[in-house]
Image (cartoon, rainbow, N blue to C red):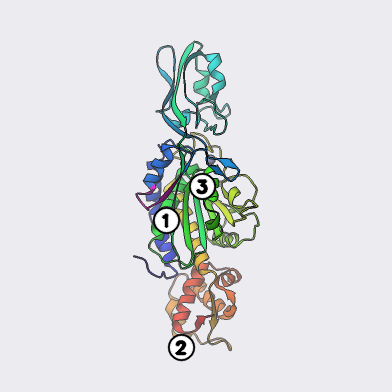
Amino acid sequence: MSADPKPGDWTRVLCPPGVGARLYAFAADIYPICRSITGPGVRETLARVERLVPLSRTETPTGAAVLDWVVPNEWSIRDAYIKNAAGERVVDFKAHNLHVLNYSAPVDARMPLAALKPHIFTLPDQPDLIPYRTSYYQERWGFCMSHRAFEALGDGEYEVKIDSTLAPGALTYGEYVHRGASEEEVLLQAHVCHPSLANDNCSGIALLAHLAAAMAQLNTRYTYRFLFAPGTIGAITWLANNRETAKRIRHGLVLSCVGDAGGPTYKRTLRGDAPIDRVMAHVLKHAAPAAKLIDYFPYGYDERQYNSPGFRLDVGLFQRSQFATFPEYHTSGDNLDFIAPEHLEASLGIVARAIQVLELGDRRFVNTAPYGEPQLGKRGLYAAIGGDKDGYAKNMAMLWILNLSDGGHSLLDIAERADIPLSVIAETADTLRQSGLLAAA
Ligand code: ZN
């Protein structure tokens, strides 16, 4: 059941208190799945999202030309191990899916350690962690393991097996579209291609899935498109399949690494002064004053595709710790202990506030008693909010709104000038409108 939301409904509905525990449970549920850019891991992940929200899935066949790329083979994996001479699994995909080079070609051989070594990836500086390595566009086979375990490998012959398939199939992405009053769209994307990495993948999928499900309860002005797609090739395939739809995208956010204790971090769009950049700066100033705002650079997540010269869509990147800056990044250290319910909830709260500002920030009103200051006491307006712990801010919000509501200033203009969160400005404007002191401009 959807209804026209009151200003306070945006955050109350989209980020209800305690939702962090549900976000965490969802991330934990999808964490064990061995995802890649194609194959059953992506489909299984989308199936878990579909428990919350119906997705429209698109399968684009191997070999399809997509922008400057070609959809690659589909990868599936059943098992992978290295066995020592005693027949013990010294590396076991079933113990951790990071142990196999993601997208690895199959192998079934016996070889001495010297021949095996060039196929093993480790992190000598972080000797207890398994690295996350991929080889999508160059066919090779390999394993990843902790440097400590690698150094313990004795000489002798090893049995090496990767039971994988690289064969023609399809690339899968899923999307949920929440229709608003306008065809203009807000794009929200999470990548779905990393295996067992909690922050750099599971957190973003969990946030986006819950947001999409909650959105169904609200009537919106914009249409919201929630895209769950493999990184790079998935976003490229979506853009290739949706050139006309892409023209309707007005604002967007890529979400990844939203569950750890760091940040938050917002990476601006290429142009740097897009409405979404202003919205995120406003929200973070009040909700997370320590947040880091950084300028665009052409490396990172799929903001690269959306901001490319052929599309130039205003899509920023929202994270907690910035990618590639934390030691757990792309290692087995990015596990379920690295993310926490409260950080997931805080991230969702920030995105919910951003949506609130996108929906309400452009509203303009006129003061219906513009000559001098209207007498608020006789209308019960001071009393209406006097006992509130935010009473001072709300009184100031009221005075600013009345002062600036000449039809020329939006609610976001007023919020910025008053240095008061848009959420307070929007709720106060609602009260003033009910009193008759404000009318739509
Ligand atoms: Zn990554």
Residue bearing mark 1: 212
The residue that mark 2 highlights is: 378
Q: Is mark 3 within 8 Å of ligand 1?
A: yes
- Residue type, label 3: Ser
Work out how far the residue at label 3 is from the one at label 1, CA to CA, in angstroms: 16 Å
Region rendered in magenta = 49-59
At a point 58% along the width and 54% down the height, the residue shown is: 316
Q: Which of the image's four quarters has the C terminus?
A: bottom right
Q: Residue 345 at what x, y percent from top left? A: 44, 53
Q: Earlier in the sequence, mark 3 or mark 1?
A: 1
Classify mark 2: residues with Cα within 10 Å, few (<14), some (14-19) or many (20+).
few
Three-letter code for the amino acid on which mark 2 is drawn: Lys
Mark 1 surroundings within 10 Å by alpha-carbon count, few (fewer than 14), some (14 through 19), many (20 or more): many
Q: Which mark is residue 256?
A: 3
Residue 129 visible, this angle:
no
Which one is in front in this view, the residue at disc 3 or the one at disc 1? 1
Residue 324, given in percent of the width and then of the height, sits at: 58, 40
Residue 436: image location, x then y, percent: 47, 84
Question: What secondary structure is marked by label 1?
Answer: helix
Which quadrant, please, contains the N terminus?
Answer: bottom left
* Of residues 77 and 317, the one drawn nearer to the viewer in this rendering: 77
